[in-house]
C-alpha cells in the first residue's frame, strides 16, 4: 500500500454559482484518495440533488482532503465574476488540510496557486477530482441559498438559487434588489435605473 508521501497529490477545483443574479460564488477543492475510489462522480449539473447529496457524503468521508470557500455578491461587484471566482478557488485550495502538489481546474483558465496548475475544459466530466469539487461546490452553494431564503423570503432563493428565473425577475421587479444581489449584473443593475 502506498503511503501519502508516495502519491502525487492532485487537487481538483471547480465552482458553482457564476451565473446567478444573487448570492455568492462557491469554489471547492478536493484531493481524492486513490485507495477509496468513489463511484458515480460526474459533473454536478448532470446529477440529481439526491445523487449530489449522496456523493457529497462519500467525498467528505473518503477524500484525503476537501475545502470550500466563497466570494460574496459585493466582492463580485467590486472585482468582477471571473476574479471573484478565482479568489474563491484560491481560498478553497489554501483551506485544504494537505497541500497539493498540483491543481487541476475546470475551465479554460485558472488563477495562480502556490503549486503548478492547469485548466481542463470540461474537466468536471473527465477528471474525478474536478467532478468531486463540482459536487461539493454545488451542494454547499444550494445549502447557502436555502438558508438565505429564510432571511429574504420574498425572492424565492430556495427554489431558484439566485438564477434569473421568471419568478426571481418578477420578485426583483416588485421588491427591488437586496444585499445579496449582484448589482453589476444587467437585470439587477436595471433596477437602479428606474
Image: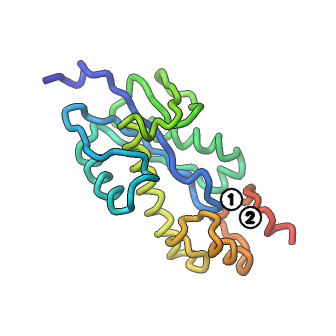
- Farthest-out residue, left: 1
Q: Residue visible at 20% across and 38% down?
A: 36
Count of number-bearing discs: 2
Q: Quadrant of residue 20?
A: bottom right
The residue lying at 42 percent from left, 51 percent from top is: 44
Q: Secondary structure at mark 1?
A: loop
Badge 2 marks a residue whose secondary structure is helix
**Mark identifier at residue 106:** none
**Mark 2 neighbour class, 10 Å CA radius: few under 14, some 14 to 19, many 20 or more:** many
Q: Nearer the viewer, residue 167 or 148?
A: 167
* Mark 1 lies on residue: 182
Name the colour scheme.
rainbow
Q: Position of residue 185 (x, y in %)?
A: 73, 57
Reading the image, the residue beneath label 2 is 188
Pinpoint residue 110: horizontal percent, then vertical percent.
57, 31
Q: Are marks 2 and 1 in contact (CB under 8 Å)?
A: yes
**Left-right relation of 172 to 84:** right
Amino acid at each position: 500500500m502506498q503511503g501519502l508521501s508516495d502519491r502525487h497529490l492532485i487537487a481538483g477545483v471547480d465552482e458553482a454559482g457564476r451565473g446567478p443574479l444573487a448570492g455568492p460564488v462557491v469554489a471547492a477543492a478536493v484531493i481524492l484518495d486513490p485507495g477509496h475510489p468513489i463511484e458515480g462522480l460526474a459533473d454536478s449539473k448532470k446529477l440529481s440533488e439526491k445523487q449530489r447529496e449522496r456523493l457529497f457524503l462519500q467525498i467528505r468521508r473518503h477524500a484525503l482532503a476537501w475545502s470550500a470557500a466563497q466570494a460574496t455578491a459585493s466582492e463580485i461587484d467590486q472585482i468582477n465574476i471571473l476574479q471573484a471566482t478565482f479568489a474563491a478557488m484560491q481560498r478553497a485550495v489554501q483551506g485544504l488540510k494537505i497541500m497539493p502538489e498540483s491543481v487541476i481546474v475546470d475551465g479554460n483558465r485558472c488563477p495562480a496557486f502556490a503549486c503548478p496548475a492547469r485548466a481542463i475544459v470540461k474537466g468536471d466530466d473527465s477528471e474525478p477530482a474536478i467532478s468531486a469539487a463540482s459536487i461539493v461546490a454545488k451542494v454547499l452553494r444550494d445549502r447557502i441559498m436555502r438558508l438565505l431564503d429564510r432571511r429574504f423570503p420574498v425572492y424565492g432563493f430556495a427554489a431558484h438559487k439566485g438564477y434569473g428565473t421568471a419568478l426571481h425577475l418578477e420578485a426583483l421587479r416588485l421588491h427591488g434588489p437586496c444585499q445579496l444581489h449582484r448589482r453589476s449584473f444587467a437585470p439587477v443593475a436595471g433596477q437602479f435605473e428606474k
